[in-house]
Structure formats: C-alpha cells, structure tokens
Amino acid sequence: PKRGEDKLRSPICCIMGHVDTGKTKLLDCIRGTNVQEGEAGGITQQIGATYFPAVNIRERTRELKADAKLRVPGLLVIDTPGHESFTNLRSRGSGLCDIAILVVDIMHGLERQTIESLNLLKMRNTEFIVALNKVDRLSGWKTCKNKPIFKAMKQQSKDVQMEFNWRLTQIITQLKEQGLNTELYYKNKEMGETYNIVPTSAISGEGIPDLLLLLVKWTEKTLVEKLMFTNEVQCTVLEVKAIEGQGTTIDVVLVNGVLHEGDQIVVCGTQGPIVTTIRALLTPHPMKELRIKGSYLHHKELKAAQGVKINAQGLDHAVAGTGLYVVGPDDDVEDIKEATMQDMKSVMSRIDKSGTGVCVQASTLGSLEALLEFLKSPVVNIPVSGINIGPVHKSDVRRACAMLERNREYATILAFDVKVTPVARELAKESGVKIFTADIIYHLFDQFQKYMDNFKE
Ligand code: GTP
Ligand code: MG
Ligand code: NA
C-alpha cells in the first residue's frame, strides 16, 4: 500500500506524572476548559481522552513562527491519574500511547509516581518530553500569558532566572540518577539521545506553544514507522456509563483501525462476554474531554486514533478497562468471546478460595484492581470473597451477608465510585452488613482501615 497521509493514524500522547503536578490543568490550558476543578478531591481517578485537531495545534504554535504542519489529522491526548493507587491506569495509559509528556512540578522535582511513570516509559521504549510545570510559582515570576518559554524567560528578573536555573539543574541531575540525559529543549543539540525539557505553566500558559511544537516535531520524525494504519481494530474500553435516553454506553479509545456503525462487537461483561452491534458512534467535540458530559457528534465510521462513545444494546454489565473486539467476516465469535474475558481472569484469581473475606465493588476494572491491590498489601492484608463492577444491588448485599456467621468483620462491602440502590442499603441495615462508600479512593482506604483497627481492639 502507498504510504500516503491517509494511511496514517493520529498519534496518541499520554500525560503522566506524580499526583498534582498539573497534568489535567495543562490539558485544560490547551483546551480552554475547566475539567480539573470539577474532579472529586481535585484528583484524576480515570483515564480521559481529548482529540486535538491539527488546526488547533497550528494555531497555538503560531507565535513560534515555526511551520507546525502535521501530516496526521491531529493528536489524541490521554490524561492519567498521578495518585499512587492508580499504577494500573498509568500502565494502561502508557501502553496505549505513542509518545508521552512526563509532567514534573518544578518546585518538587522528581517524586514517587514520576519515577514509576519513567520506568513504565523506559520499559516500553516510549519517547517522551518532560514538562517542567508551575514555572509561575518561581518567586517574582512575571506572567507572559501563553508566550513561548524563551520569550517569557527573557522577561524575568535575574533572581527569577537564577532560581529557575538552580531548580532546572537539580532536576536534570535527578533525571541523570534515573539513567536519563535531559536538557532544556532549546539548548538540546542531540534530540533523540537527550530528552527534552519544556518549562510550562498550566495557569498562565507560558511554554505551551513550545510543548505542542515539540510534539509535532516528534510526530514528523517517527510517524512513518509507528503510525501506519492497520485494519485490525485495537480498542480499549475506558468507561461504562448510563446516559439519559441512551441506556448504557461505553467510552473507548480506538488505538488503531476503523469502527463503523453496525459493526458486530464483543466486550467483556461481569456476567460473561457481550456480543452486540454498534448502534451509534459518538465523539465529543474536538478539544473536549470524553470523560465530561456534553453534546456529541455522530459518525458513520471513525478512524483511529479517537476517544469514542459507543451506543449499543446490552452493555449494562460491560467492564471498563478491557479490550473491545470487532467480529470480522472470517472470525469465529467463540474465539473472540474467550479473548475478551482474559482481562477479567487475572482479577478473578484474586478472590480467596476459602470463600471468606470482604466484598469489593467499583466503577471500573481499573479502580477494582486498585482496591484489590490495597487489600492485598502487607500492612492491610484482608482477603476478598466477592467482587463486582457497577452499582451495589440487593444481591451483592446478600452475598456479603454470608460472612455474618463466619467472620463478622468481613461482612462489609467496599464500594468505590458506585451507587448503592435504596433496597440494597435497606437490606444492609437490617442484616448488619457494613457498606463503605467513597468517590475518592484513599478516603475509602482510610474508612476501612479505621473500621478494621476498631475490630482489632
Ligand atoms: P492528578 O491527576 O490528581 O494526578 O493531578 P494532576 O497532575 O492532573 O494535577 P492538577 O491538574 O489536578 O493540578 C493540581 C493542582 O496544581 C491544582 O490546584 C492546579 O490548579 C495546580 N496547578 C497545576 N498546574 C499549575 C501551574 O502551572 N501553576 C500553578 N501555580 N498551579 C498549577
Ligand atoms: Mg489530573
Ligand atoms: Na490533581
């Protein structure tokens, strides 16, 4: 096939780094949105996806007088959580991407999840750019809204420049200790060997044009090998959501291939594989986050890479964090059904064979994995007898009731980011099953830890 532009898919760029370094805020700054302030506890707890069309990127890099022409239609940017509980989501995000932005807070330097993210990127040989964020926090920083960083830096006093250089040097040293050569991007003469650092502010936008231009340049350099279209659909379910008037929908990241309205698909479900047909293919407007409720654009077909909302029948028990498969004319549905259930298997194996333990329920496979990881950790070490994804129903409480006679303290349900139906709550109250709920994952850990400590006394 001809290696033409229509044969290239949009690259996927993943934003990673320690909690609160400004990953979501950086995206807000580029999008002109305010997603971060709407997040529970101000932390990201899911993977998000935003499509940046090439024209918007060109617009934002105009100041640099560089011709940021993209040979691809745009960039799909994936936001990931920095909180320690979500190693699995960072791993999933980094597994999806072609390039990454590693965000470091200039005031804090390298932190635990910065290093964890770095190791994930190294492991997969993923190219990345370091965004040295929050430069506006340098004392005395003079705001130069949305300016290229070189220009903004020239406006700063000697003191600010000195503090900047001092912090930069420290961080370059810390990165060196991790086995990485890095350099301020406009001084970097060995692009490729030496990773680029771009100072940014997600609040006032300094350095954003530079960051975008570098992403474009990288794309130009590596696109032919990495971004060829394949006909094979590669797709991951990020979220399962009930939408008023549409029933249950799934949000997916289409990494490669094409999806069509009417395609027969198979996804993993808590009650077994789900075989269904795509009724509608929807995307948020460009520059809008897939996670956030809004109006959607309808498509007959969609080419990778994209964040997509799929409307189809029977998705109620679909499991977020698993693969989506399209049934082709030559495919055996039974084989595909088996493949879809693989992701669920590793989680199922965590359930205690003795049948004694607490019940755990979460909104996605990713957050369920995070909860199981917490319960398994040496300090906590609590067995799990049952898991589920989605709202807590009466049947879930009934299952937990079984513990009342065996091991009273385990007659509990840890419910993260899911609703508890009124009847379920009623039954729990009558029977003495304890339900812990929280929409911030570490609050749930704290509640449960306190409860267990009381039991020990
Ligand atoms: P998680 O997703 O929870 O890991 O955090 P995050 O990396 O997405 O950081 P987030 O965007 O939630 O920002 C954390 C806090 O830092 C918020 O209060 C932001 O307003 C603030 N912040 C982010 N970027 C900047 C920046 O460039 N300058 C300043 N002054 N504050 C920033
Ligand atoms: Mg975030
Ligand atoms: Na945050």
Image: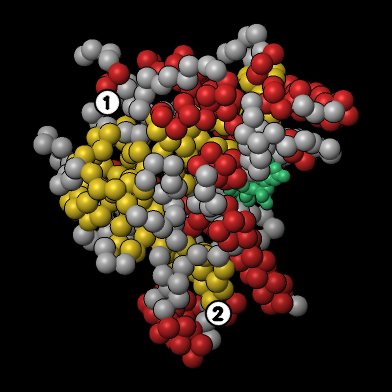
Does residue 364 appear to the left or right of 127 in the view shown?
Answer: left
Q: Nearer the viewer, residue 278 or 427?
A: 278
Give the distance between the C-alpha atoms of the residues marked 2 and 1, in whole angstroms: 50 Å
* Residue located farthest toward the bottom when viewing the structure as drawn: 430
For residue 434, which numbered disc appears in the image? Answer: 2
Tell me the amino acid under the disc marked 2. Answer: Lys
User: What residue lies at 65% left-to-right and 18% top-to-bottom?
Assistant: 185
Looking at the rendering, which quadrant does residue 146 occupy? top right
Q: From this view, report whether residue 113 is shown above or below residue 213.
A: below
> Looking at the picture, how far across and down is residue 7, in whole percent?
27, 21
User: What residue lies at 88% left-to-right and 29% top-to-bottom?
Assistant: 159
Looking at the rendering, which quadrant does residue 76 occupy? top left
Q: Is residue 66 visible?
A: yes
Does residue 42 appear to the left or right of 353 in the view shown?
Answer: right
Does residue 246 appear to the left or right of 67 in the view shown?
Answer: left
Q: Secondary structure at mark 1?
A: loop
Q: Nearer the viewer, residue 395 or 85?
A: 85
Other residues around mark 1 within 10 Å, as few (<14) / some (14–19) / many (≥20): some
Q: Nearer the viewer, residue 279 or 55?
A: 55
For residue 230, which numbered disc appears in the image? Answer: 1
> Looking at the picture, how far across and down is residue 204, in whole percent?
66, 40
Q: Secondary structure at mark 2?
A: strand
Q: Quadrant of the N terminus?
A: top left
* Residue located farthest toward the left when viewing the structure as drawn: 329
Q: Quadrant of the C terminus?
A: bottom right
Q: From this view, report whether residue 27 is shown above or below residue 153.
A: below
User: What residue lies at 31% left-to-right and 67% top-to-bottom?
Assistant: 244
Q: From this view, report whether residue 420 is shown above or below residue 287.
A: below
* Residue located farthest toward the top when viewing the structure as drawn: 189
Tell me the amino acid under the disc marked 1. Answer: Thr
